[in-house]
Image (cartoon, coloured by chain):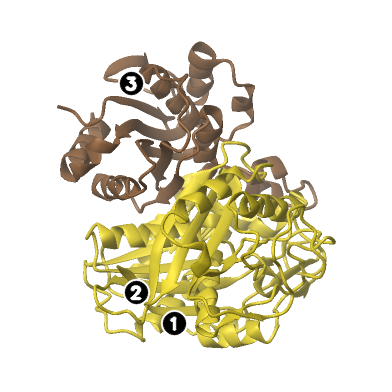
Chain colours: A yellow, B brown
Amino acid sequence: MVVKLADNIISPLGVTTEENYCAVKAGRSALRLHEGVPGIPIPFFASLIDETILNVEGDYTKFERMCIQSVAAALAQCDIDASSDRVLFIVSTTKANVSLLAGGRYSALRDLPSAVLPGVAASRIASYFSNNRIPLVVSNACISGVCAQIEAMRALEHGLCDYAVVVGADVQSPFIVTGFQALKAVSTEACRPFDRDRKGLNLGEAAATVIYGRSDTECDRWQMVCGAVRNDANHISGPSRTGEGSYLALRSVLQKIEPDDIAFISAHGTATLYNDEMESIAVERAGLTDTPVGSLKGCYGHTMGAAGVLETLLSMCAVDDHTVLGTRGFENLGVSRAISVSSENRTTDRHAFIKLISGFGGCNAAAAFKKGGDR
Amino acid sequence: MSLIKHYVRIIGQQPMDGSHPTTYNNVCLDGQILVSNASADTLLADIYKEHINDYPKFYKMDPLCKAGFVASELLLNAEGRRQEQWGESRGVVLFNAASSLADDRNYQATIDDPETSFPSPSLFVYTLPNVLTGEIAIRNHFYGETNFIVLPTFDSDAMASVMEMTFSDGSLRSLVTGWVDCYSETDYDVLMFIIERDAVSHRNELSDEIKRLWVN
């Protein structure tokens, strides 16, 4: 089986997974209004990392420093030789070092710094740990963090590596913020997932790392059970009206995990009108309306490439703590299907959860995780 | 016996000095040269008009999607099974090095000078490489796995490994896959093909075959 060996989260709420979990459980959020940011004329609500918390020395971009620091913190928890070619680095990101394009500094293609290419950025991150194996960059929009974990699980199951280091991150540069503003997808206040008054998403910055390995014996570790990726085949930037891809991904995952074992579904819950409605339809179609559903976007905003990893790790902490985390910003159910969302933390004695996520390009993913072996 | 039954190769490269490219085979389908000596800036639209021509959304696409979409159409026409209901049994997994760089640069230009221009939502939606896998899924009603993997450089071993891994998904019977890299409207490079589930148990042979089609 594929088990979690170590992890880390770096966000405005803390530089360890534990700090982040405690902050979320206490209902804290790093979302606030940002005004006068160079390159972003319109004020925006976001959760941004202050560079003073980043301690990596050397000629690295903010994106690379976030990734390196998070991976280093995770590696420090386990006895793995990261330089081995049996260790595969998988980077989950949507825009990596795109901010290097800013300001029209490089009008000619040949003058661009190579680190603008995500694969080169990933190599720089892996090389920091003396790992020379070709890294994979999963760039599957907002679902990258779950897809990257699915690739890690598969690589381990196929014996293509002995350890997989998955790191997800994105920097909220003017590139991304102005783009989401142009799409009119952002809320001008703290986001309200699944609420009837939700007005759109907030953007956020984080880096999250999970290291997976194989184990036949250890039953006290978190296990990645399965995952599935499905396309809506409907629209490149809008969710399916029938929740097709998310439903199909959930249906696939439910072949390998019992609904009665599931403590909760950690949904995407971006707080856009269409995403949250779509997820409610998918959850209902999958027969999971009795299963608690939650979103962490009210604490972190949408952290893009980090989201799938960050939300998986915090869900593991929550199950360990017998807790279903409340959905910050939620008050009154504002989706058409009667799913079980709460603003308050709830208790649970179950040992598994599903991470559900969807993104541009019509892609959707679901993955199931459980604590311990077969109990 | 070859593991790859249908493949398409599209090369668009404009010399830096703007002169017409020298003798060049731009488009090759299942080993047959379809177009040669064409100019990179008109090639994709020309193929669209001659071989596709029923999907006006093509004209809204960014350069990466145009290149990948045209390749997928030629490929799926050659396969000759366009009427089938694929459901979850077919996925699309593509690879490149430049991610969505061509469109990223075009979008960046719309935000570099707030005095003269506004952020373009229609350019922004294409600043993700996996929008291409989405476009192909939408056109063909493929509900299976779609994913986009960026590599430091073209690497057939890494690609063959990911293809093999993708078939861990028991619903998947075949994949539209390959390399679709695009740096600008006049600089793109495509090797796209279809593989069936039984091909991926031969990972090393698959890698060799990808490499052979790439350099030819």
Where on the picture, by quarter, is residue A84?
bottom left
- Do the residues marked 1 and 2 share a common chain? yes
What number of labels is visible? 3
Residue in view at x 58 percent, y 52 percent: A286
Q: Position of residue B154 (x, y in %)?
A: 31, 45
Q: Nearer the viewer, residue B112 or A255?
A: A255
Mark 1: which amino acid?
Answer: Glu
Reply above or below: B5 against A74.
above
Q: Which mark is residue A57?
A: 1
Any part of residue B127 in sight? no
Q: CA distance from mark 1 to mark 3?
A: 48 Å
Q: CA distance from mark 1 to mark 2?
A: 41 Å
Please give left or right for residue A9 compared with residue B114 in the image: left
**Label located before the other in sequence (1 or 2):** 1
Q: Circle 2 is placed at which residue position?
A: A373
Please give left or right for residue A184 compared with residue A369 in the image: right
Please give left or right for residue A322 compared with residue A338 in the image: left
Quadrant, the N terminus of chain A: bottom left
Residue in view at x 60 percent, y 88 percent: A22
Q: Position of residue B111 (x, y in %)?
A: 70, 52
Q: Nearer the viewer, residue A55 or B81?
A: B81
- Front: mark 1 or 2: 2
Chain to which mark 2 belongs: A
